[in-house]
Image (cartoon, grey):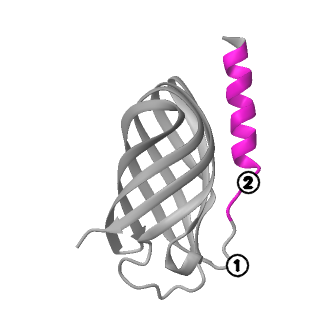
Amino acid sequence: MNKFLACAALIGAVGLAVPAQAESGGVKIGTLSCNEHGGWGLVLGSSRAMSCTFTSGDRIEHYDGRMTKIGLDLGYQHSGALFWTVIAPHTDTGHGALAGHYAGGTASATAGVGIGANALIGGLDRSIALQPVSVDGTTGLDVAAGIGSMTLRAEE
């Protein structure tokens, strides 16, 4: 168990060391929260569906998405909740501006209940940053580290 905790701490440190940065700084425009569906890690990666909500004051937008991890991913994750601060180049982003592809570093460890980090950049002309890192609350028995890719599609 001590080896697992040491591995989890190392993975968390790696994830925290690679925060995403918007291309030209930016301003906080809201938060993005996602519920990640469960599934098996496939040794060299995984792909799980997500349902996400972006909130900014009175504005609420819903997105469907998929998180794909390439790298080490061993075990089964029952579910996960991810939360990001959303940074954009300006405050007047239109409806669906978070739709698109994101990429960055990812790391997580789960033994019953777990934690992880996902630092991603993408969206509107690669100008949206989800940062500094997501809070990733998971349940299951899983360990993952590598490159994360997320695709968001705005719901109408």
Nearer mark to the viewer, of 1 and 2: 2
Quarter holding the N terminus is: top right
Tell me the number on the disc at residue 25.
1
Dot 2 corresponds to which residue?
18
Secondary structure under the numbered disc 1 in the rendered image: loop
Region of the chain picked out in magenta, as a range: 3-20
Q: Is residue 55 above or below residue 50?
A: below
Side of 72 relative to 152 (left or right) = right
In this image, 102 relative to 56: left or right?
A: right
Question: Label 1 to label 2, Cα distance in Å?
Answer: 16 Å
Amino acid on which disc 1 is placed:
Gly
Which element carries disc 2, helix, strand or loop? Answer: loop
Q: Relative to residue 104, is residue 64 drawn left or right? A: left
Pick the front one: 148 or 116: 148
Q: Position of residue 98 (x, y in %)?
A: 44, 72
Mark 2 nearby-residue class (10 Å; few <14, some 14–19, many ≥20): some
Amino acid tagged 2: Val
Q: Is residue 5 above or below residue 53?
A: above
Quarter of the image with the C terminus is bottom left
| Residue 20 picture quarter | bottom right
On whether residue 51 falls in the magenta region, the answer is no
Percent coordinates x, y for residue 64 in the rendering: 32, 59
Residue 43, picture quadrant: top right
Residue at left offset 67%, top offset 18%: 4
Residue at 38% of width from left, 33% of height from top?
A: 39
Instruction: State the image coordinates of residue 128 (x, y, percent, origin top left).
Output: 56, 73
Horizontally, is 24 left or right of 139 in the view?
Answer: right
First in sequence: mark 1 or mark 2? 2
